[in-house]
Image (cartoon, rainbow, N blue to C red):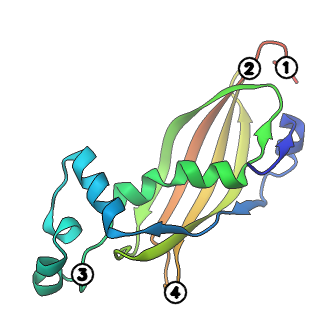
Amino acid sequence: MAGRMSVAELEGRVGREIGLSDWVPVDQPRIDAFAEVTEDHQFIHVDPERARREGPFGGTIAHGFLVLSLLAPMTYQVVAELDGLAMSVNYGFDRLRFLAPVRAGSRIRGRFVLAELSRRTDRERIARFAVTVEVEGGDKPALLADWLVLLVLDPQTAGA
């Protein structure tokens, strides 16, 4: 976790980069495990020999949704814990694009910019993160997203 801060301090970070996560390995066992859980066994993900032979990427690639799912642990590294936060909830995406494949054996990292923080109610804020997932050594990002996170404050902090 990237330390602690108040909601007011977070508001002061709007428009600025919040942080850059560590590199996350995306190896074949991780891809296979994701395929098992999601029941998505398309050969470009789980069959290295066939993917090399018949696929357009020269080998297996991660599922786009696997890359997307790794945003959550990346944020734990870069977004400070908020004082008075009861919980945060994935609220959705306004924009999401998968721009480049993540080949098995690659490493990725997330770059997070706090694009907006808006008051929904006294106890709720919506944080909009502009997220870029970079592939180590890649010339274009794997993913670009406008990610919305609902921040729910505890009742004692509401109105702060």
Q: Do the residues labelled 3 and 2 touch (CB within 8 Å)?
A: no
Classify mark 2: helix, strand or loop: loop
Residue holding disc 2? 123
Residue holding disc 4? 137
Sort mark 1 into few (<14), some (14-19) or many (20+) by Cα contacts within 10 Å.
Answer: few
Q: Which of marks 1 and 4 is in front?
A: 4
Classify mark 4: helix, strand or loop: loop
Mark 1 and mark 4: span between their CA atoms?
45 Å
Residue holding disc 1? 159
Residue 59 is tagged as 3
Q: Position of residue 106 (x, y in %)?
A: 43, 77
Question: Of the residues shown, which amino acid type is indicated by label 2?
Answer: Arg
- First of labels 4, 2 by sequence position: 2
Q: Do the residues labelled 1 and 3 touch (CB within 8 Å)?
A: no
- First of labels 2, 1 by sequence position: 2
Identify the residue at image location x=24%, y=81%. 59
